[in-house]
Image: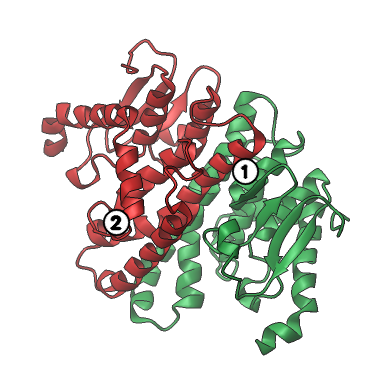
Chain colours: A green, B red
Amino acid sequence: MPINPNASIEITAFRWVPEPVQGLVRDLRARWALEEVGLDYRVRLLDQQRPPEYLLEQPFDQVPCFSDGKVRIFETGAIVQYIGEQSEVLLPRDAQGRYRAIQWSYAALNSVEPALLNLVLIDFFYTGEEWAKLRRPGAEEFARLKLRRVSDWLGDKQWLEGGRFTIGDVMMVTVLRFVRHTGLVAGFPNLDAYLKRGEARPAFKRALADQLATYKQHEAEGAAA
Amino acid sequence: MPINPNASIEITAFRWVPEPVQGLVRDLRARWALEEVGLDYRVRLLDQQRPPEYLLEQPFDQVPCFSDGKVRIFETGAIVQYIGEQSEVLLPRDAQGRYRAIQWSYAALNSVEPALLNLVLIDFFYTGEEWAKLRRPGAEEFARLKLRRVSDWLGDKQWLEGGRFTIGDVMMVTVLRFVRHTGLVAGFPNLDAYLKRGEARPAFKRALADQLATYKQHEAEGAAA
């Protein structure tokens, strides 16, 4: 099990988050990549109310941060890419294979995630607001267009670049999970199968189980806060 | 001048775009990075209506794509990072310096750009729609929060990681330009000075001039279309 209190790699994560976002918080990506590569890590837990000095580590006040004694970085795209560089498991060594994977990491975060997160905001954070009701059909249509683009690209490939699982898939699968409260991904059978293939990986299952176990352990404090 | 019809590097760009987005289209990032590093490139121009087969190169139907005979990639984050890897000018060689720069490239695209692009959508694409009117104050507040986070991090540093200009700055400066139609960046004097410092770089000026010259050259066809 890669969680090890004496590991040199440390990530930050939340002690507890409300149910709708459990299993979606971004430290999942770092955990998953670490599990795939087989690197031990320890977790520094944060309360929902982060101390002001956390901004010096993470200027956008989010999780995770990553450190390993060599680098200290934030942003899951960079963290997962860095983890990928530690072995050939997640990031091919040849220039084309390497940059196709990096390109999909950026694409997941910049060309897909914003459209899907917009639906999460509308459905969970701005519920009941008039603009959210008026905007929802258009926002859903835009999210569906982005999913169609990925589905069309994917075709009958196993992973985004064919037979090989990469950091691009770590990012894309976790991005697709953001709209799990809708039936949008299921509207594209090949994309749905891709998502399920990602979630069926043993490394993903361990990463998710560890994230959820922490929330479970701190449920009483979380609910009281 | 890096534009050279016989260059091995090719990027795609639009022949013409409407005035509000001139100087914002993302091929600017690739052009700027190429100018900083001093690599020749040629441009393959596309009409606003791309041919269906362009999706095989760029699944999200955007510009730019990049190829150099070794790699063929899309997504400006990946393209600028790849260009950065060709020399030490934009990407430090040590692990920490390198990944701090990569982290800022991802941060610009994922933690800042979506909030700013949301204002662009509201102000230019959904003008007059009821949800856009209702949403605008909140969207502006969210964009301002993101800018405050970057401003607080920046402090009195010259660039995001101190004295050295990196790919992270290429991405962040071009992201900040998205809200040029508002006074938002000017509300943070250090961020405003940072943006102007970026735009004053000779490489940026050449990249922008070349992008705009193409639009000027095709203005008649563009306006007629």
Residue at 32%, 32% in the rendered image: B201
Q: Chain of mark 2?
A: B
- Compared with A14, A160 (above or below) is above
Q: Residue furthest front?
A: B156
Closer to us: A124 or B89:
B89
**Label 1, on which residue?**
A168
Rendering coords of residue B138 (x, y %): 35, 72
Please indicate whether residue B24 sits to the left or right of residue A190 in the image. left
The picture places residue B16, in percent across and down from the top left corner, at 22, 34
Name which quarter of the figure residue B58 lies in.
Answer: top left
* Residue A80 pos. (x, y %): 66, 46
Q: What amino acid is at disc 1?
A: Gly
Residue depicted at 48% across the width and 76% down the height: A125
Q: Position of residue B31 (x, y in %)?
A: 36, 28
Label disc, if present, on residue A211 of the rendered structure: none
Location of the N terminus of chain B (image quadrant): top left
In this rendered view, identify the residue nearer to me: B165 or A61.
B165
Please give the residue where the numbered disc 2 appears in the rendered image: B120
Q: Quadrant of residue B159?
A: top left
- Residue at position x 25%, y 26% from top? B210
Of all residues, the one furthest to the bottom in this rendering is A224
